[in-house]
């Protein structure tokens, strides 16, 4: 893998995981980008762009956090992009 496909700078966790699992680095990034974190206001961003990794995952968990669009602290839905 030559690096991320956008201007996104990988977080320490992303660098560590993709280095340890180098043969799967592209798959890890692609799969993490297919998962979205969506606020109740409708703003959505991929798990990868938020600095996370979600690889070979299932389910629809939620996470508590501050939305970068509306600045509200709410539960954010994590779901796979269709």
Image (cartoon, grey):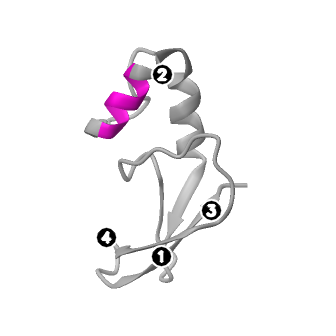
Report the magenta residues as a range: 13-19
Q: Of helix, strand and loop, which one carries label 2? A: loop
Which of the two residues, 79 or 68, is positioned nearer the viewer here?
79
Mainly helix, strand or loop, the magenta region? Answer: helix
Return the residue at label 2. 21
Which residue: 68% across, 54% down?
58
- Asked whether residue 58 is drawn in magenta, I would say no
Q: Nearer the viewer, mark 1 or mark 3?
A: 3
Report the quarter where the C terminus lies.
Answer: bottom right
Q: Are marks 4 and 1 in contact (CB under 8 Å)?
A: no
Choose the circle earlier in sequence order: 2 or 1.
2
Return the residue at label 3. 79
Q: Are marks 3 and 2 in contact (CB under 8 Å)?
A: no
Give the Cα separation between the discs numbered 2 and 1: 31 Å
Give the Cα separation between the discs numbered 3 and 2: 24 Å
Choose the circle earlier in sequence order: 1 or 3.
1
Image coords of residue 4 (percent x, y)? 40, 28
Give the Cα separation between the discs numbered 4 and 1: 9 Å
**In the displayed structure, does residue 64 sit left or right of residue 10?**
right
Which residue: 58% across, 53% down?
35
**In the displayed structure, does residue 10 sit left or right of residue 17?**
left
Return the residue at label 4. 68
Dot 2 alpha-carbon crowd within 10 angstroms: few under 14, some 14 to 19, many 20 or more: few
Which residue: 34% across, 81% down?
70
Give the Cα separation between the discs numbered 4 and 2: 30 Å
Which of the two residues, 37 or 61, is positioned nearer the viewer here?
61
Return the residue at label 1. 39
Choose the circle earlier in sequence order: 4 or 2.
2
When asked about the image quadrant of residue 36, the answer is: bottom right
Which residue: 65% across, 56% down?
80
Image coords of residue 22 (percent x, y)? 47, 17
């Amino acid at each position: 893998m030559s690096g991320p496909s956008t201007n996104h700078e990988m977080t320490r966790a992303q660098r560590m995981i993709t280095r340890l699992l180098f043969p799967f680095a592209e798959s890890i990034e692609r799969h993490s980008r297919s998962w979205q974190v969506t606020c109740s206001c409708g703003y959505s961003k991929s798990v990868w762009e938020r600095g996370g990794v979600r690889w070979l995952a299932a389910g629809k968990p939620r996470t508590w956090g501050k939305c970068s669009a509306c600045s509200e602290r709410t539960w954010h839905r994590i779901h796979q992009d269709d």
